[in-house]
Image (tube, rainbow, N blue to C red):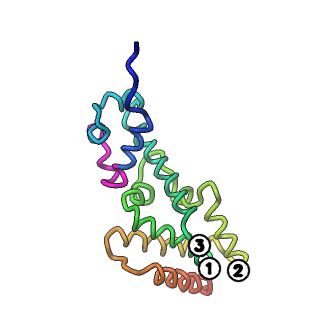
Amino acid sequence: MARKETITMQMILDTAFAMTREEGFINVTARKVAAKAGCSTQPIFRVYKNMDELWSAVYSKAAGFFQDYYGLYPRTGKAPFVNLGMAYIAFAREERHLFELLFVTSGPKRKSMYELLNGKDGNVVYEINMAKAAGCPDPSDLFMKMWIFIHGAACMTLTGDYDLSDVQTQELLERSYQAFASAR
């Protein structure tokens, strides 16, 4: 009778994803995943043809995690791009290693920042349409300006240089939106 598989593809993926969240993507190696999963490296390479395939699965899971995080993030801002910015900055603060993987590091077969932000629900398009409905003559340009500001703030959380509260962050984003929208 064939031996029952005790280490599944899902278990390996979940272990590698948890390691990415805790230690960073760079620390996801076959030996470390095997040690954390309580197995040898053999089950990893039984279900994944190589580490690139596992890393790709971790990346995809991280992208889905961000989409879920964004979808569940409370919407308190009224101005366009504020809620997107609040969620993005909070994600950088709360999920440092996933943020770095998705939005700071580059690599083959990675989605663009725009693809990740827009997601399957059209998050960026929704915000751009909100700005257009609010009378902004060039909402795409406004998005670019806001996004440079938002991404900078999020990256500052990684270095510990961003210590504003959520209330202060929301006020800053709303003021920035007004300033960028009125500067023509």
In the image, what residue type sits under mark 3?
Answer: Arg
Point out residue 74 in the picture as x, y percentages from the top left corner.
56, 70
Q: Which mark is residue 17?
A: none
Residue drawn at point x = 36 percent, y = 37 percent: 51
Quadrant including the N terminus: top left
Q: Which residue is mark 1?
A: 79
Q: Position of residue 26 (x, y in %)?
A: 31, 49
- Tag 2 residue: 134
Tags 2 and 1 touching, CB below 8 Å: yes
Up the image or down, 137 lies above or below 89; here it is below
- Say which amino acid is labelled 2: Ala
Name the element at disc 2: loop
Q: Which circle, 2 or 1, is nearer the viewer?
A: 1
Quadrant where the C terminus sits is: bottom right
Magenta span includes 34: no
Quarter residue 136 falls in: bottom right
Magenta part of the protein: which range? 19-31
Q: Main secondary structure of the magenta part?
A: helix
Q: Secondary structure at mark 1?
A: loop
Q: Is residue 25 magenta?
A: yes
Q: Which residue, as the protein is rendered here, is positioned at the far top?
A: 1
Name the residue that disc number 3 marks.
75
Q: Give the number of the mark in front: 3 or 2.
A: 3
**Mark 1 neighbour density, 10 Å: few (under 14) some (14–19) many (20 or more):** some
- Is 139 located above or below residue 10 in the figure? below
Is 169 rendered above or below residue 29?
A: below
